[in-house]
Image (tube, helix red, strand yellow):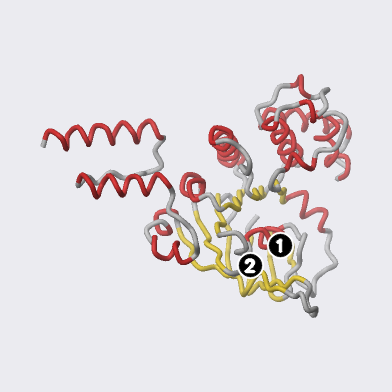
């Protein structure tokens, strides 16, 4: 499903003393099958923007096209339930939305709400469990008996069970330790590649945008300040600084090493072990010279 924002603005509590314009004349396009990162500092408009993709919010001005769905103030009468079945959202701290007595009932809740046939529900539950790397024995347990990481995976399984064409991730690694963050992001990246989903990552983590995204949109003060490939975006450190964003740690480290030792090491999305190996080899060569 292609996604297009055309001159989209959104104002909270319009025509009141508390009105606040969160989005300002947004124009952007996301192609089917892309992994896109939407990055920005707190208050930049990231979460407001993502809520337009599945119709949780409608533009104050402009229009949003998501596949066959046209979202605007003038076009309210649509079956948004169908859209939300196709565009799944993993909100920040999704485990806070768990409420059923068992994991099985929690994952199946959305399926029943969207009237998925009963004989298909169990198949979808098992498939979703496999996607999030949980075993079948968790189904009979209360989600609140599980670890924090397992609870998050259960909540994500509930979204994946809907077989969305678009997967929207709103700060999906919030509150996780570094290993947990990497595991979750690798899981999403694997799903993106194997299921050919359109994946939209909303984050302030530059490391994740660098490692996984095909295309990046930088938001600041409700507007798109920059867009391009990771290489294009992260070659403009001064512009990122204006948006109150830092360079990814790995790029900052490589830049410092290259400046100190006269090397020309490149990131090229390599795993840390492979990158560390080249750095060590190049520094040994440098020492011999």
* Residue 171 x %, y %: 63, 48
Q: Quadrant of the C terminus?
A: top left
Quarter of the figure with residue 261: top left
Residue 52 is marked as 1
Quarter of the N terminus within the rendering: bottom right
Question: Quick one: SS at disc 2?
Answer: strand
Q: Is residue 203 left or right of residue 251?
A: right
Q: Residue at x 87, y 34 (%)?
A: 100
Give the CA separation, mark 2 to mark 1: 9 Å
Name the outermost residue toward the left. Answer: 289
**Where does the image place residue 42, in percent across and percent down from the top left?**
60, 59
Please tell me which residue is depicted at 80% across the width and 53% down the height of the picture: 82
In the depicted structure, whether residue 18 falls above or below residue 130? below
| Picture quadrant where residue 180 is located | top right
Element at badge 1?
helix
Residue 145 or residue 132, whichever sits in front: 145
Provide the residue designation for mark 2. Answer: 5
In the image, is 13 to the left or to the right of 22?
right
2 and 1 marks in contact (CB < 8 Å): yes
Q: Residues within 10 Å of mark 1 (few under 14, many from 20)?
A: many
Please, which residue is most extreme toward the top here? 137
Task: Estimate the x, y position of residue 251 in percent, counting from the top left.
Answer: 37, 48
């Amino acid at each position: 499903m292609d996604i297009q924002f055309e001159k989209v603005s959104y104002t909270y509590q319009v025509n009141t003393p508390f009105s606040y314009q969160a989005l300002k004349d947004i124009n952007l396009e996301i192609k089917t099958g892309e992994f896109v990162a939407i990055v920005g500092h707190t208050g930049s408009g990231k979460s407001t923007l993502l809520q337009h993709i599945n119709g949780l919010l409608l533009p104050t001005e402009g229009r949003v096209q998501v596949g066959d769905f046209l979202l605007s103030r003038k076009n309210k009468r649509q079956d948004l339930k169908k859209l939300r079945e196709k565009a799944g959202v993993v909100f920040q701290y999704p485990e806070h939305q768990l409420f059923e007595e068992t994991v099985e009932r929690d994952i199946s809740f959305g399926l029943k709400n969207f009237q998925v046939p009963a004989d298909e529900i169990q198949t979808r539950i098992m498939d979703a469990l496999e996607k999030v790397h949980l075993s079948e024995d968790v189904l009979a347990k209360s989600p609140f008996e599980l670890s924090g990481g397992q609870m998050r995976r259960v909540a994500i399984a509930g979204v994946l069970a809907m077989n969305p064409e678009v997967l929207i991730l709103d700060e999906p690694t919030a509150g996780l330790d570094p290993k947990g963050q990497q595991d979750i992001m690798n899981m999403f990246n694997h799903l993106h590649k194997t299921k050919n989903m359109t994946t939209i990552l909303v984050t302030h983590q530059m490391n994740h945008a660098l490692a996984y995204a095909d295309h990046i949109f930088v938001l600041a003060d409700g507007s798109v300040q920059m867009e391009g490939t990771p290489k294009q975006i992260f070659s403009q450190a001064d512009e990122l600084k204006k948006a109150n964003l830092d360079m990814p740690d790995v790029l900052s480290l490589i830049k410092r090493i290259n400046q100190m030792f006269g090397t020309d090491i490149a990131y090229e999305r390599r795993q840390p072990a492979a990158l560390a190996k080249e750095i060590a080899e190049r520094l040994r060569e440098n020492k011999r010279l």
